[in-house]
Amino acid sequence: MPTILITGTSRGLGLEFVRQYAASGWTVLACARQPSGSTELMTVAAANPQRVRLLALDVEDHAAIERTAHELEGTPIDVLLNSAGIMGNGSFATEGIAFGRFGQSDFADWERVFRVNVIAPMKMAEAFVGHVASSDQKKIVTLTSMLGSVALNRVGGLYAYRASKAAVNAMMKSMAIDLAKSHGIAATAIHPGWVRTDLGGPRADIDAPQSVTGMRAVIAALDLSRAGRYWVYDGSEMPW
Ligand SMILES: NC(=O)c1ccc[n+]([C@@H]2O[C@H](COP(=O)([O-])OP(=O)(O)OC[C@H]3O[C@@H](n4cnc5c(N)ncnc54)[C@H](OP(=O)(O)O)[C@@H]3O)[C@@H](O)[C@H]2O)c1
């Protein structure tokens, strides 16, 4: 069965990806800052001891990313999935669009948002490109957001998060072009929908199982002809 490495699996979409891929028989390398701190992740891992391997990984820690890549040397990774992401201080879930207003920027917080949402997926891709290239499926996926679309921004606000997701879109587009040529890898960004997680909040449109079921279908269909696009969880596409 194929192998997937997922970041940010302690909760939310990352955790649901672990559940669904493990239930489908995949080998899951589940990365979380502190796996033992998530009862739900520990429960999924205990129920699937042959399939789920827990790895402690803070994606802001580049030395730890390199160490993990080294530990997994010789392990083909069919799908590298960057799910870990943050919106920054404050809460979009409670404040909605008022969160991250002009004039309220905390630039230390901006830097953290960029380290997790943009730099980490780049570092992960560079560290694990060899593992992915040696696999059968050869895919790199990063979760983006509709809020990264410049074309669809009609209400403003949410500066750091929007900018980080627009940046990761540009990054995944370049990766799709470069890695297709150099390694035959299909790279892309996927918007999960507005999902009821800690990040999305309770008023969001869909739940994590629905979002992840849809994204798994998009990932299954991903090939070089479908790489470098702005996919939505339901298989539609979004304007950049
Ligand atoms: N939910 C939505 O509506 C929505 C919409 C569009 C895009 N997205 C994107 O989807 C992805 C997942 O979001 P979510 O809704 O699942 O969010 P979530 O429920 O808030 O979970 C975020 C996950 O990221 C992890 N994380 C944060 N910083 C990390 C770090 N430095 N190193 C490793 N892991 C870290 C968290 O781990 P800890 O438990 O250790 O903090 C947690 O597991 C994000 O990229 C987000 O931007 C979500």
Image: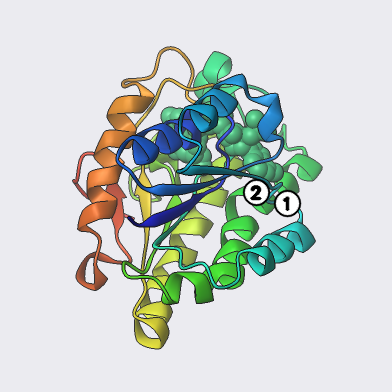
> Splitting the image into 4 quarters, where does residue 126 fall?
bottom right
Q: Please provide percent x and percent y for residue 29.
A: 53, 49
> Splitting the image into 4 quarters, where does residue 95 fall?
top right
Some atom of ligand 1 lies within 8 Å of the CB belonging to the residue at label 1? yes
* Residue identifier under label 2: 116
At 31% across and 54% down in the image, what residue appears? 230
Q: Residue furthest front?
A: 50
User: Residue type at mark 1?
Assistant: Glu
First in sequence: mark 2 vs mark 1:
1
Some atom of ligand 1 lies within 8 Å of the CB belonging to the residue at label 2? yes
Q: Please provide percent x and percent y for residue 92.
A: 56, 23
User: Residue type at mark 2?
Assistant: Val
Name the one closer to the observer, 109 or 175. 175
Q: Residue furthest bottom?
A: 182
Name the one closer to the observer, 214 or 159. 214
Q: Is residue 186 above or below residue 209?
A: below
